[in-house]
Each structure stands twice: as C-alpha cells, then as structure tokens.
Image: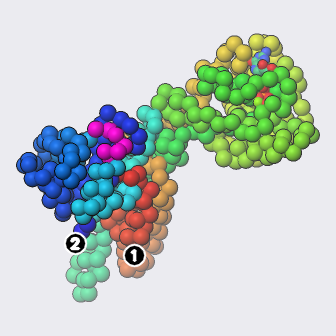
Amino acid sequence: MQTTICAPATGPGQSAVSLIRLSGPQALAILHKLTKGQKTFPAREQVFCRLYDGEQILDEALVTYFAAPRSFTGEEVVEFALHGSAYIRGRLLELLCASGAEPAKRGEFSYRAFLNGKMDLLQAQGLCDLIAAGNKAAHDLAVSSLDGRLSGCLMQTKTALTNLLAQIEARLDDVDEEMPPLDALQTEQILQTQINQLAQLADTFSVGRLLKEGLKVAIVGAPNCGKSSLLNALVGFDRAIVSEQSGTTRDTVEETLDLDGQKIILTDTAGIRDHALDPAEQEGMKRSLKAIEKADVVLFVADLTRDLTLQEETLWADVQKADKPTVLVLNKTDEAPQGHCKLEGKAQYTIYVSCKNGDGIGKLKQELLNFVNVPGVKATDGVMISNLRQYQAVLDAQTELESALVQFKRAGGLELYAEHIRAALRALKDLTGEVTPDDVLDVIFSTFCLGK
Ligand SMILES: Nc1nc2c(ncn2[C@@H]2O[C@H](COP(=O)(O)OP(=O)(O)OP(=O)(O)O)[C@@H](O)[C@H]2O)c(=O)[nH]1
Ligand SMILES: [Mg+2]
C-alpha cells in the first residue's frame, strides 16, 4: 500500500504561520486522531480546529482537507496552517509520524503528482524552477513550463510523428501491397516542419539557460585599471576593496545584480601582470583565468590614462582564444577624456566609462542585457528550454528526424525509416516523462526541495 508522507511546506525558523502537508491514504484518519474526532472536514474548506498532543493542546490551526483525486498529489491531502514556531512544527511532524506517516523525501509530493498524472515531467520541472526563480526572467521562463506551454508545443510534434508512424506501420503490415505508397512530398514536408520546430526550440537553450541561471560576467584586466571600481559601480555599493596600489584584489570577488529582472553574476578578479609579488597573488591570477573560462561574457577593463602593456595584450589574446563574447571597457574617462586604446578596433563591443563619476555605467548595463534579450530566440508560443536534459532530448529527436528524412529521400527501407521516427518519439516522450526510467525520475525529483 502507498505510504502517507508528511513534510513542512514552508521554510525553517520562526514565522507568523507555517504550513505542513500530509499526503496519502492515511491522511484523513491521522487528522481525526489529532483533532480527537471533534470536527468534520468537508473537502477544500478551511476548518479552524485544535490539534492535540496527548491531552494537551498543541496548537489552534486552520486545516484544509483535499479529497483524492482533487489534490496536488492526486491523493488524500491535509494541509495544516500552524502558528510558525519551530517547536509546534517539529512536534506536529513527530505526532504525524507516530500516527503512521513517514517523512517525505525531497520532491516526493511532486513525484506522486507526476505518477498520478497531475502533471508531466516538464511541468514538474517548471514548478521546481518556479520556486527557485529569484528574478522576473527566471520566473517567466518557469511559468511557461508550468502552465504546459512547452508540453503543448512538444505535443504537436508528437502527434504529427505518431500519425506519420501509423501510416508507415500500416504499409509495413500491408504484405499484399494493396495500399498506395506514402505521398513523398507531403511526408517530406511533415518531417521538415518538425525538424525546423525542434531546431528552433533547441536554439532557445543558450538564452534560456542564461535566463534561469544568470549571466556570468568576469571582469578582467591589468592591476589598477579599475576592475574592482567597476564591480562596485555596477552593483551600486562598495563590494570590493579599491586602492591606488596595484595588486589589491587577490581572490575573486563575486556579487549578484538584478538588472531589469535579469540575474547577472559579476566576478571581479585579480589583475594580471608579469611578476606576482607572492604565491597568493600568483594563485589569484590563476583564478582570474579560471573565471574567464567559466564566464558567459568577459569585461576586459583597460585604463585610458596609460598605454596598454605587453602583458595586457597577451591577456587580450588569451580572452580571444577562450572565444567568449568580450566587451572592452575603457575606464577613467574623467581623467583622460580624449584617451584611446589600441584594442578599440579589435573589440566587438567598446564602452567608455568612468567608475569615478559613473559615466557610461548605464550603457554598459544595457550592453550586458543585450546578451540575454536576444530578439527572436523564442520558439512557438514563446517557450524556451533552460535545462540540459531537455536540450539533449530535443537535439536527439531532431537528429533522428534528420536521419529519417535522409532515409526517406533515399527511398530506403520503410522499416529503418520507421525506426528513426520511433527513436525521435522516444526522445520526446522521455522529456515529458512518459517513458523515463524510474531511476532517472528518482534523480530528477531528488533535486526538488523538501515539501514540494
Ligand atoms: N580617475 C579615476 N580613477 C579611477 C577610476 N576607476 C578606478 N580608479 C582608481 O584606480 C585605482 C585602482 O582601482 P581598483 O578598482 O582598485 O583597480 P583594480 O583593477 O581592481 O586593481 P587590482 O585589484 O590591483 O587589480 C584606484 O585608486 C581607483 O580610485 C576612474 O574611473 N577614474
Ligand atoms: Mg581590484
């Protein structure tokens, strides 16, 4: 028999109210036990009642009972809205477990909702992303998964492929060859349309990922060019130490910025020069190079009050080799308003700033936003994918359909052609969880938060 599980649905610590959720066949019986049978609980109505710990009152709570299958998990569910003391919460969980419930695993409520057909895997992942979203962009992205837009978009492709497969299979079964052959033009068109749709969806991944995880920006350059000053100017407070001495920043300094609802993760780094003063600075420089590797965008800062050093030119070449979008940020325009830098012609983007008086900082922020607000990346219905597993499945499906098309055009055997379409369908069904193996599902849901 299915177990009954319980977990806090709200965070730890003290709060005005906290919520505990109970789900499974024993939920209502456990509720009656804790309220000493003093109340009835009509489904979906909040009932004010006393919860007992033996003969003592534990709390006065608002309790809602959701009858199966009309609940989040599709099972019998009880939600306790308690006074938010850590003691009440902890004690109620103990009482629930003493009455036959078990502590829920991470994501177990969502897992049960998925198993009971309340949502597909994409929607469950959307829900997980919704809770994790710390800014508007990530939130909007999660909503488009949660409300089924992404599933709907894939459903169209699945339906088209299923119909096509049915037609092929009918011909494979037609040993007497009584059926007319497949309409070549129409079949090719169907395949090509689906390939294009999947390719469009796959293309949204690079931006979708940035929207969800945030744009990682590394600030690099020679010592004293104003990297830490730039970090501070962008975030709007003195996050990193600034001084006129070269080699001030040793370790990398990270700070997150919310720019128009988009998460930007800035990393200030140690300045790169020929001779490190000591092992700590040397290690700092190594970390600067690692920050470049990890970044989505590099801000290469140069000081307009002086000429570029050889070391800076080498660093510039290294950044180019890393093949990252790079913005050349020419700093200290207040002191050198006519200053120039020999990299200007070589850089894709150049912005003049003064970290001292704030000139150009707004423009730089806008430039950073341009890396995520790429026009036209949204696929049908404004959906995007942001998860690597989803991306790989979409690519797999696309590759299989491309092979199917080649096979069909070559007028090869129908069986092989059908096999590629089946494989594409499998990849798409794996996305929505229809054919996903249990151990993979376990891993996916275990990344969800407790109580969800
Ligand atoms: N005039 C002027 N000075 C600036 C500007 N930005 C930074 N500085 C000065 O340049 C010096 C170095 O600034 P930092 O921000 O510490 O430079 P950094 O690149 O982080 O240096 P390291 O951490 O040593 O690699 C400080 O004295 C700053 O006040 C600017 O826009 N104009
Ligand atoms: Mg610094």
From this viewpoint, which residue is outermost toward the bottom?
A: 176
Q: Which class describes the residues within 10 Å of circle 2: few (<14), some (14-19), or many (20+)? A: few
Q: Magenta residues?
A: 83-89
User: Residue 141: percent from the left, percent from the top?
Assistant: 41, 42
**Of the residues tagged 1 and 2, which is closer to the observer?**
2
What secondary structure is marked by label 2? loop
Q: Is residue 198 above or below residue 279?
A: below
Q: Which mark is residue 348?
A: none
Badge count: 2
Mark 1 C-beta to ligand 2 under 8 Å = no
**Tag 1: amino acid:** Glu
- Residue at point 24%, 64% (across, down): 100
User: Residue 428: percent from the left, percent from the top?
Assistant: 38, 62
| Quadrant of the rendered image holding ligand 2 | top right
- Residue at point 41%, 46% (across, down): 129
Relative to 444, is 355 on the left or the right?
Answer: right
**Tag 2: amino acid:** Met
Would residue 88 be counted in the magenta stretch? yes
Residue at image mark 1 = 419
User: Residue 150: percent from the left, percent from the top?
Assistant: 35, 50
Question: Is 29 or 291 nearer to us in this picture?
Answer: 29
Q: CA distance from mark 1 to mark 2?
A: 39 Å
Question: Is 99 or 421 nearer to us in this picture?
Answer: 99
Q: Can the viewer see residue 53? A: yes
What secondary structure is marked by label 1? helix
Q: Is residue 404 above or below residue 109?
A: below
Q: Which mark is residue 1?
A: 2
